[in-house]
Image: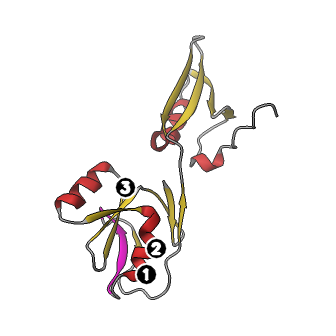
Amino acid sequence: MKLTINGTSVVADTFAFDGCHKIYVCESADDESEAEAAGYSLLPVERLAETFEQSCPLRFVSNWGLTVHFVSQRENGKIDVRVQKMRKGVAIRVESSNGRDLVAEVSTADAVLFANVLACSPAARRVWIEGHQIAGPVDELDTVPAPAPAGA
C-alpha cells in the first residue's frame, strides 16, 4: 500500500511495534523478517495512526532501516497517515524497433523502474503504462492517467 506519513510517501503493508513506543515501517519482506526475529509485532499499516496515538510519550516512527524518520521521538502533535490501496500489478506494453511487442504485468513496486528503463531504451519505440503512452521518465504511477472506463 502507498502511505503518506506527515507528508512523506512510502510503500508498505506492515509496521513493526515493540508494544510501547518504537514504531518502524517495514518496506520489504526482509524488513518484516528482521523485525519478527528481533521480537517486534507486525501490524497492518491501517492501524498505524491508532497505534501511534496509544503509544507512550517516547514514541517515534521511522523506517526499519532508520534512514527515514517520519515522526521524531517525543514529537508532540498528531500523526497524519493516508493509506492508498495499490493494485497487485500494472500492465506495461512496449512497441520495439524490431517489430516485436512486449506486454507484461509487473508488480506495482517495479512498474516505474521498468517503464523508465524501457522509455530510455533505443530499442523501445513506444511505451505504455495502463494503456497510456509515456513520452519519457515518470516519477511515480500517480503521474500516469487512470485508464478510461470501458465503452467511454
Of the image marks 3 and 1, the number of the one nearer the N terminus: 3
Q: Amino acid at mark 3?
A: Glu
Instruction: Tell me the distance, in whole angstroms, between the alpha carbons under discs 3 and 2.
Output: 17 Å
Residue pictured at 23% horizontal, 53% vertical: 33
Give the SS element for disc 1: helix
Percent position of residue 78, x then y: 50, 82
**Residue 61, quarter of picture:** bottom left
Question: What residue would you read off at disc 2?
Answer: 49
Depth check, mark 3 against mark 1: the one in front is: 1
Q: Decide: marks 2, 1 in contact (CB < 8 A)?
A: yes
Q: Amino acid at mark 1?
A: Glu
Question: What residue would you read off at disc 1?
Answer: 53
The quarter of the image holding the C terminus is top right
Q: Amino acid at mark 2?
A: Ala
Instruction: Tell me the distance, in whole angstroms, between the alpha carbons under discs 2 and 1.
Output: 6 Å
Side (left or right) of 50 relative to 145: left
Question: What residue would you read off at disc 3?
Answer: 27
Percent position of residue 106, x then y: 48, 33
Side (left or right) of 58 relative to 142: left
The verdict on residue 60 being magenta is: yes
Residue pictured at 62% horizontal, 50% vertical: 142
